[in-house]
Image (cartoon, helix red, strand yellow):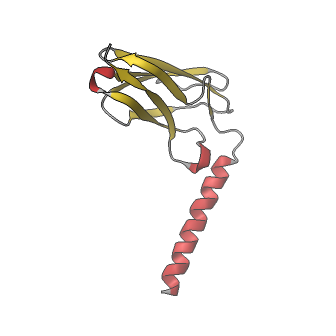
Amino acid sequence: MKKVLMTLICIIAGFSATVMAQDKNPDAPHFKFKEGDTYDFGKVKKGPVAEHTFEFVNTGKQPLIVQDVTPSCSCTKVEWDKQPILPGQKGHITLGVKTSELTGVFNKSVYIRSNAIVPNGEKRYTIYLKGDSVEQ
């Protein structure tokens, strides 16, 4: 039992050190979203696609590569810049919410898998869309 416990402690310590080392890499790419990582549509008419483009800058010293952008539901379409975003350059992620598939208040998460440093040691960066789909 002691061997199993010690093995688990070593694995956790190694993982924590890796995450902490990643967070302290000053050259690694970083997302800095122009208007923050949440966009509120407010009240939107049910039916048309509500679209928003998140603009970000790579504030790191290495190219930022967005490998995948995955919405939390199929009611959100996604487009993003596929080429590497060089340090200091802007990138874009455009999201379109199919309001015809929503009723009332909505909160959607969109997950970005990239080589950028992510807060709190997460494996992916998350941006958010919210609003209220209403009949008009």
Q: Residue at x 52, y 86 (%)?
A: 2
Q: Quadrant of the C terminus?
A: top left
How far from the left and from the top, in percent, is residue 32? Answer: 63, 29
Total marks shown come to 0
Residue 43 appears in view? yes
How far from the left and from the top, in percent, is residue 104? Answer: 35, 28
Residue 35: quadrant of the picture: top right
Q: Residue at x 50, y 42 (%)?
A: 124
In the picture, measured across the screen, residue 7 lies left or right of residue 13, that is: left
Residue 88: quadrant of the picture: top right
Which residue occupies the extreme bottom position in the image? 1
Residue 75: quadrant of the picture: top left
Q: Is residue 57 above or below residue 116?
A: above
Residue 81 appears in view? no
Which residue occupies the extreme front position in the image? 136
Q: Residue at x 58, y 38 (%)?
A: 116
How far from the left and from the top, in percent, is residue 65? Answer: 53, 32
Between 35 and 114, the one lying in front of the other is: 35
Q: Residue at x 63, y 49 (%)?
A: 22
Q: Is residue 20 above or below residue 96?
A: below
Q: Is residue 1 above or below residue 57?
A: below
Which residue occupies the extreme left position in the image? 101
How far from the left and from the top, in percent, is residue 97? Answer: 37, 23
In the picture, measured across the screen, residue 42 lies left or right of residue 88, that is: left
Between 81 and 92, the one lying in front of the other is: 92
